[in-house]
Each structure stands twice: as C-alpha cells, then as structure tokens.
Image (tube, coloured by chain):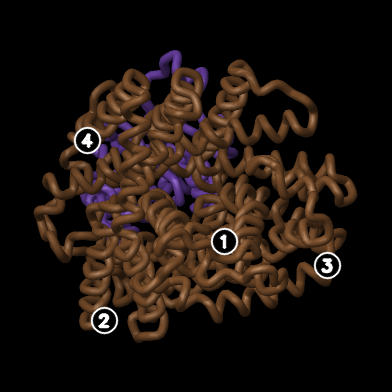
C-alpha cells in the first residue's frame, strides 16, 4: 500500500519520539516500505550540531541505529533551513516531495487553544501534504 | 532551503574545540528558551533605564546631553583612528590570501542571491538614514562650506569641513558631497563589515554560537562564556534596543510630519500611537513570516521602490547636474578622504567632532545589530567577496544616492536662494525637494512608504538579533520570544514618546550613541581576534 515512508526527526528531542519511531518501523516492515528519516538543520550552530555537515552525520547514525534496532530498511536525508522557527513546515513539505514519500509518520503534541492560531508542525503537514500523514500523539 | 547528503568532508568547517554546548546556560520558563543571565539583565535594565529617564527627565537629559558630546569631543581622535583602522583592516583582508577563506567552509554555497543579500544589507544598515539624510546632509555641508571659516579667538566656530570653500558654489558642492559620502560610505560599512565578518567566521567556520561574545574566543578562551561574555552581549542588546526604539520614536514623528505635510493629518498623540502600532504590527507579521518570508521580501520590495524613486529623480530632475554631482562628488571624496579621516592636526573641530566622531559613534553603536544581521545572511561568501560587497558596493550606491538627492536639492538652492528645501525641517526636506518635480504627491507618498517599510524591516531584524543574543546564540528559540522583543521595542518607543516626548528620546538616543565608545574598544579587540582566527584557518588549510 505504501512505498516510501518519511519520518521527520527532531534530533534534540528523540526521547519524545519513541512511539512514532516504533510505529514507523512496524509499518515499514508490514508494507515493505523503506523509512527515510528526515532532519532539518540550522545553518548556524545549535545545541545539536556545530554545522549542517555534522548534523548530517548525526542523522545518518540515528537512521543506522533505528535500522539496527527494528530491522527495517532505513535511510536519512538532511535539509537545511534559513530560519527554522518559521520555515520548518515548508521545508518538511518540500522534503515529502523530494523524498517521494507516500506516508509521513510524525510525532505531534496534543492540540490546545494555541493551535487555533498557530497550527502544530504536524497539523500543517497533514493539512498541506499530498501524502498520507499519520500523526502520533 | 537546500538539501545535502554530504558527510563531513575536506571542505567542511572545523569547529572550535570547546566543552561549551550552545544553550547550556539557557533556562526554559513558560516554554521559553532564554540565556541566563543575559535575558533577565537586559530586559530588567532596559525597563529600569526607561523608568529612571522618565522619572528624572531633566537630570537624564542633562547627563546624556553632556555624556555624548563629551565622548565625541574628547575622544574624537580615538573614533577617527579606530574607523581608519577598520577600513585598512578590511582592505588587508580583501587583498591578502585570507580573502580566499569561505564562510561556512570550502563547500558552502551562498544562501541568498546578490539581489536579496544587498537588499537586506541596505535595509538593515542604513535604509532609513539614506531617506532622511540623503537630502539634508549634502545641503548642510554645502551651506557651511559656502559660508567659509569663522574664527573667534584661536578656534574656528563654523561647521564647515576642512578648509571650507567660501563663496565658491562648485567647490562647496564638491566638498559637501565628499563630506557626506565620507560619513556614509567606506568607513561606516567597514565598521559593519568587521562585526559581521567576525561573527560569521566564528559562527559558520568555528561552530560557536551566533552571539557577540563568540568573536572573542581566541582572546578570552573559555572565559568568554562567563561574565566577560555576559557584559558584551548585554551591552549589545542594550545598544540595539535603545537604538531601534528611539529611532522608531523619532521616525514616527518624522513620518507623521510627512503625512501632515502631504495630507494635513494630525501629529497628536493618538496619531503617534497609531503609527507606532501599525509599524510594530507590520513588524510582528514580518517576524512571524520568518527571515525569507518577512524581512527578505520586504527588503527586496523596498530596495526596488527606492531604486524607482532614484531613477525617477534622475530622469525628471536636473539630470546633467545630478551626473555631474555624482562624478565630481565621488572624485572629491577620493581626493579628500585622507584629510577628512585625519584624527590629528585639524582645525575644523565642529565638523570632525560634531559630525564625524558623532557619526562613527553612531555607526559603531548600531554595529552589533547590523553586523549580526549581516552575518546571519552571509554564509557561503568568501571573505574577499564579503568585504568587497559590504564596503565597496554600498560606497558606490551611496555616491549615486547622495549625488541624486543631494545634487538635486543643492541645484534647487543654487538656482533660488529662497528655495523651500533650504529652510525646511529635517523631516520635510525630502518632500520639499520632490515638490517642484512632477508627480510630487505620488513620489512623496512613495517616500513615506519607504520610510515606514524600512522601519518595519529594522524592527523585525532587530527583534531577530536581540532574540538570538538573549537566547545564548540559539536561532531556533520559540517564536514568542521574537514577538516579545518586537512588541517591547514598540512599547518602549511609545512610552518614551508619550510620557517623555522628544526630550526623553533625545536623552536615551544620546545614551545609545554613547555605547559607541565601549564598543569601539570591543571592535578593535574583535579585529585582533578575527585576524587570529583567520590566520589559524589559513594554517590549517
């Protein structure tokens, strides 16, 4: 049913992604669809990496660790944003197309009143992406 | 946005070996992500300064009214020498092999096209200034030069640059243009270039946080993460916020004067608050749209509109005179740059202290803000390309802009000594200059739009910069923090304007300009630090 799964990853908060990562890996094995772990890097140094190249290495290692843990086929792809505070949704929407994903699995927080004004990242991806989107609360 | 799947190769930058992790000193109250103690100290001291200034207006006005001239008069040689050093330093970087170093590593690609990059440089650097002073400053220097020198006792009391040009209109125009270009071209942009290049290098090539303190790592080592760094960063926030808030306050009065001139609108308190609210509201929208969707788009629109206004004036104005002013003014600048920048042995104290030293202090006090913003958008440029584009291109643009607006205004005064542009208030000179030209209402309205949008881009980019500094160099702190700083700037401007009026604004603006003095020392140290960093990078390659 699905051929390529994309999982956006926030490398700064991987501890909060356990549920979505497990679901993505199980769906991957179930449908035989590889998972591409997508990370969006800052151009400036951040608490995660000193530069995009280092971020790419960390993301690659993360994908390898996921593949080793769950036994599914995994790759990684890094994108770079100019201003992640506001651009991350647009970068992820572009990533869905570039990765060729037909299913996006991503973690999202429980919506509150704030989401009526500022939709969550997951909410915006679900609203605008042509791919199927599985939001994991 | 770009994507890459390269791993760290030979072209990747080499991070500084430090145990410090970006954000390690941050605290996260109410879902925020702010540096402790820079955020708190900056925020509280800004509120305290506003309150004290409003409570003791007379004393604050007297103190800062004394401090700023004291600094620029006593240390004029220091400001002038430092600015010369910055220009020479930039030229050295441009012509030596250090110029080959690429910001972000050998493989880095520029994030923005030249058009977008230049638009943002100008919008942040001096867009508003060019609108207000493009007409008035050439006229001032022209008039003072025409007036010749006046000596009382042993000191000159006139404000003419160098030896003036008494009674010689052509020579006075050239000297006036040279003096104006001098204040807006190589020197100010070299000041910005030093800060921007240092920040860009230590951020993109050395992996240090995008904040002022990082530029001092070669000199201070790990101490830069302690109180030395806190002081530098807090001072930068302080200078930026008060610089932008007082400019916003004055700019509001000036824009209202323009609207009143055109449409007879009022200039009362309601109108002031309304205009500050509109500017701040527009800046908030821009902030929420981010760097690419907000400030970049607005900067490009504004530079396009400014280009149209420039072309219009060149075509319908005294075209031959404008070109003559550009050429002869530009040549006069080249001829007079050495005497104008001489820190010692001058007798034009009013000019060198009241104009030049004041301007240098002003540009230097703005340099943390503008430099940091330029740094953020300059990844992927080589040092040579960066310095050339940041100091040489703006100099050429300045010659064209000042030649057009200043040349037209001077031509009007030469043709008619009683031309309205001569006696008009500073904020109205642009409109009075445009009035005799065709379609004056439209071009004046365009002028007001340009001023307002430049304020929006300044407010937006200042919010980005202040937020990044007070978040310990994090550029991805929650957007609500940018909203806070943007709103805070508007509130400070409105409070000062309504409660204290022009007096309070003048006092705090003098205070902001006074920060130019400590920052001159900071910038000189930054040159040493940057040189050490670049030399190390050369050795490593």
For disc 2, the marked residue is B538
Image mark count:
4
**Could you tell me if the residues under marks 4 and 3 are in contact, i.e. CB atoms within 8 Å?**
no
> Of all residues shown, which one is farthest toward the front?
B153
Q: Can you tell which of label 1 and label 4 is closer to the viewer? A: 1
| B214 to the left or right of B343 | left
Q: Can you tell which of label 2 and label 4 is closer to the viewer? A: 2
> Of all residues shown, which one is farthest toward the right?
B438
The residue lying at 45 percent from left, 51 percent from top is A82
For disc 4, the marked residue is A15
For disc 3, the marked residue is B319
Q: In the image, is residue B324 above or below residue A61? A: below
Q: Can you tell which of label 4 and label 3 is closer to the viewer? A: 3
Q: Chain of mark 4?
A: A
The residue lying at 74 percent from left, 23 percent from top is B265
Mark 1 lies on a secondary structure that is helix
Q: Gap in Å between the C-alphas at discs 2 and 3?
A: 49 Å
| B23 to the left or right of B320 | left
For disc 1, the marked residue is B118
Q: Position of residue B296 (x, y in %)?
A: 57, 49
Mark 3 lies on a secondary structure that is helix
Colour brown maps to chain? B
Q: Is residue A79 visible?
A: no
Q: Can you tell which of label 2 and label 1 is closer to the viewer? A: 1
Colour purple maps to chain? A
């Amino acid at each position: 049913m699905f051929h390529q799964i994309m999982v956006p990853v926030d490398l700064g908060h991987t501890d909060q992604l356990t549920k979505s990562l497990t679901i993505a890996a199980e769906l991957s094995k179930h449908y035989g669809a590889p998972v591409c772990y997508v990370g969006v890097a800052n151009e400036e140094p951040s608490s995660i990496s000193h530069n995009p190249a280092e971020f790419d290495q960390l993301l690659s290692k993360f994908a390898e660790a996921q593949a080793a843990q769950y036994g599914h086929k995994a790759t990684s792809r890094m994108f770079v944003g100019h201003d992640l505070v506001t651009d991350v949704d647009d970068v992820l929407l572009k990533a869905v197309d570039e990765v060729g994903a037909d299913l996006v699995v991503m973690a999202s927080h429980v919506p509150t009143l704030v989401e009526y004004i500022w939709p969550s990242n997951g909410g915006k991806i679900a609203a605008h992406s042509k791919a199927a989107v599985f939001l994991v609360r | 946005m770009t994507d890459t799947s390269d791993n760290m190769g030979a072209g990747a930058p080499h991070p500084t070996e430090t145990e410090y992790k970006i954000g390690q000193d941050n605290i996260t109250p109410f879902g925020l992500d702010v540096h402790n103690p820079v955020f708190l100290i900056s925020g509280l001291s800004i509120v305290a300064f506003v309150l004290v200034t409003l409570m003791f207006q007379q004393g604050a006005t007297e103190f800062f009214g004394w401090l700023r001239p004291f600094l620029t008069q006593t240390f004029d040689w220091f400001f002038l020498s430092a600015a010369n050093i910055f220009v020479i330093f930039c030229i050295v970087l441009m012509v030596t092999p250090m110029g080959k170093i690429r910001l972000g590593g050998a493989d880095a690609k520029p994030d923005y096209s030249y058009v977008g990059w230049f638009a943002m440089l100008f919008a942040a650097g001096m867009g508003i200034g060019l609108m207000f002073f493009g007409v008035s400053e050439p006229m001032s220097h022209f008039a003072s030069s025409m007036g010749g020198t006046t000596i009382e006792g042993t000191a000159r009391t006139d404000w003419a640059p160098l030896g003036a040009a008494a009674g010689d209109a052509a020579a006075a125009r050239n000297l006036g243009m040279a003096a104006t270009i001098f204040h807006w071209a190589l020197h100010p942009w070299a000041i910005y270039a030093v800060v921007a290049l240092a920040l860009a290098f230590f951020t993109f090539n050395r992996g240090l946080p995008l904040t002022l303190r990082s530029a001092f790592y070669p000199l201070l080592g790990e101490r830069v993460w302690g109180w030395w760094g806190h002081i530098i960063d807090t001072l930068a926030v302080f200078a930026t916020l008060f610089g932008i808030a007082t400019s916003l306050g004055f700019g509001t009065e000036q824009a209202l004067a323009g609207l009143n001139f055109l449409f007879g609108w009022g200039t009362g308190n309601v109108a002031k608050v309304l205009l500050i609210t509109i500017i701040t509201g527009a800046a908030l929208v821009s902030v929420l749209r981010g760097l690419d969707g907000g400030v970049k788009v607005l900067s490009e629109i504004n530079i396009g509109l400014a280009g149209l206004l420039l072309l219009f004036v060149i075509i319908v104005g005294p075209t031959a005179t404008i070109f003559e002013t550009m050429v002869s003014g530009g040549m006069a600048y080249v001829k007079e740059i050495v005497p104008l920048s001489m820190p010692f042995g001058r007798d034009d104290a009013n000019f060198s202290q009241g104009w030049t030293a004041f301007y240098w202090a002003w540009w230097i006090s703005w340099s943390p803000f503008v430099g940091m913003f330029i740094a953020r958008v300059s990844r992927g440029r080589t040092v040579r390309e960066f310095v050339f584009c940041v100091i040489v291109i703006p100099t050429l643009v300045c010659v064209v802009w000042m030649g057009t607006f200043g040349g037209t205004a001077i031509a009007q005064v030469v043709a008619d000594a009683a031309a309205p542009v001569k006696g008009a208030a500073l904020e109205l000179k642009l409109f009075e200059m445009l009035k005799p030209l065709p379609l004056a209402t439209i071009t004046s309205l365009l002028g007001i739009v340009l001023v307002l949008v430049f304020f929006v881009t300044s407010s937006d980019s200042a919010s980005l910069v202040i937020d990044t500094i007070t978040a310990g160099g994090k550029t991805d702190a929650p957007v609500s923090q940018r909203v806070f700083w943007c709103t805070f700037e508007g509130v400070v401007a409105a409070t000062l304007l309504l409660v204290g009026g022009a007096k309070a604004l003048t006092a705090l603006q003098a205070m902001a300009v006074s920060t130019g003095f400590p920052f001159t020392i900071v910038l000189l140290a930054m040159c040493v630090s940057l040189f050490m960093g670049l030399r190390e990078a050369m050795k490593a390659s």
